[in-house]
Image: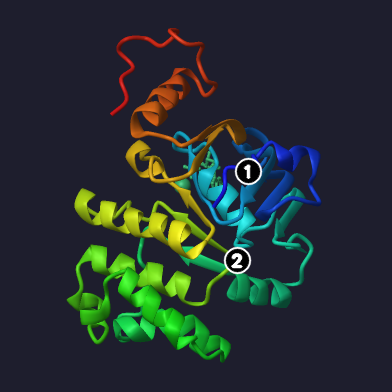
Amino acid sequence: MTNTAPSTADAHSAPGAGDFAARAHQIAKVYGRGDAQVIALDSVTVGIPRGRFTAIMGPSGSGKSTLMHCMAGLDSVDSGQVFIGDTELTGLKDKQLTRLRRDKIGFIFQAFNLVPTLTALENITLPMDIAGRKADNAWLDTVIDTVGLRPRLKHRPSELSGGQQQRVACARALASRPEIIFADEPTGNLDSRSGAEVLGFLRDSVRRMGQTIVMVTHDPSAAAYADQVLFLSDGQIVDTMTSPTAERVLERMKGFETGGRPAAPGAQEPGVAAR
Ligand SMILES: Nc1ncnc2c1ncn2[C@@H]1O[C@H](COP(=O)(O)OP(=O)(O)O)[C@@H](O)[C@H]1O
Ligand SMILES: [Mg+2]
């Protein structure tokens, strides 16, 4: 990792270039019609730098999950373009999209989504087994040791703690060395200690293995593990922060509680304390 990683602003000027693992160009997503219409994404342009840990923060309903789902090809956009690496995802046929997701994207969800009848190891290799691909055993060993699952490989999910289950899900996402991993509130179901373990592991996989990770979270202390934070408000990216700390992220988030747009410094009401 270097200090010359492209900033998200570069995505505006050079939508066809740059060292981005994923890019969105002016994507829009509207749910519902008429009075019930919600603009979930309002012309979002963003690049996710390769080999870095990016957090997406914002108030509830600001469009975080929608952005992640659209960038990962789990949901369609109404307009705009999404790229994973050099491949434009928007416009792909279902079959091609399924293959691209399988080959290039890893997912970690709040609910661990493990198969209860399979062991930890079987869960980790399941996506590759389905794809008919052989695991790279040396890499698999590295991943298993990094997440500290070696003594638990033969256990089923019900025999593992929540933190261990999420580490299985992390190992599963990393096992095929995807171009990019998307994680939506990965620590949402974990106690703070297990959450810290998982976040530390995600950060290490970026620093040591060069993995690219995008994590949606509403938790400033989780965002502090990232290299950069993108702030969403009302379906737009309104700010970015590099080398975040929990305190600075929390301070920044307070500005959103006054009505969706960042407030001027000092304009916050004293009573509007962040939880
Ligand atoms: N399937 C859906 N149908 C209708 N509205 C939706 C749907 N999914 C999300 N929304 C709306 O879009 C906005 C953004 O939602 P979401 O991306 O889930 O926000 P976040 O993850 O930041 O909480 C919200 O107002 C939400 O109610
Ligand atoms: Mg969400």
Please tell me which residue lies in front, 193 or 147. Answer: 147
Query: CA gap, disc 1 to disc 2?
Result: 20 Å
Q: Which mark is residue 28?
A: none
Q: Residue sitting at 32 percent across and 86 percent down?
A: 118
Q: Is residue 152 above or below residue 23?
A: below
Residue linked to disc 1: 4
Q: Residue sitting at 45 percent across and 79 percent down?
A: 139
Q: Amino acid at mark 2?
A: Glu
Please tell me which residue lies in front, 179 or 76. Answer: 179
Q: Is residue 229 above or below residue 97?
A: above
Q: Is residue 148 left or right of residue 66?
A: left
Locate residue 75: give its quadrant.
bottom right
Mark 1 sits near ligand 1, with its Cβ under 8 Å away: no
Q: Which mark is residue 179?
A: 2
Instruction: Give how far across and how far down residue 274 sits, in percent.
Output: 32, 25
Quarter the C terminus occupies: top left
Instruction: Give how far across and how far down residue 16 sits, in percent.
Output: 81, 51
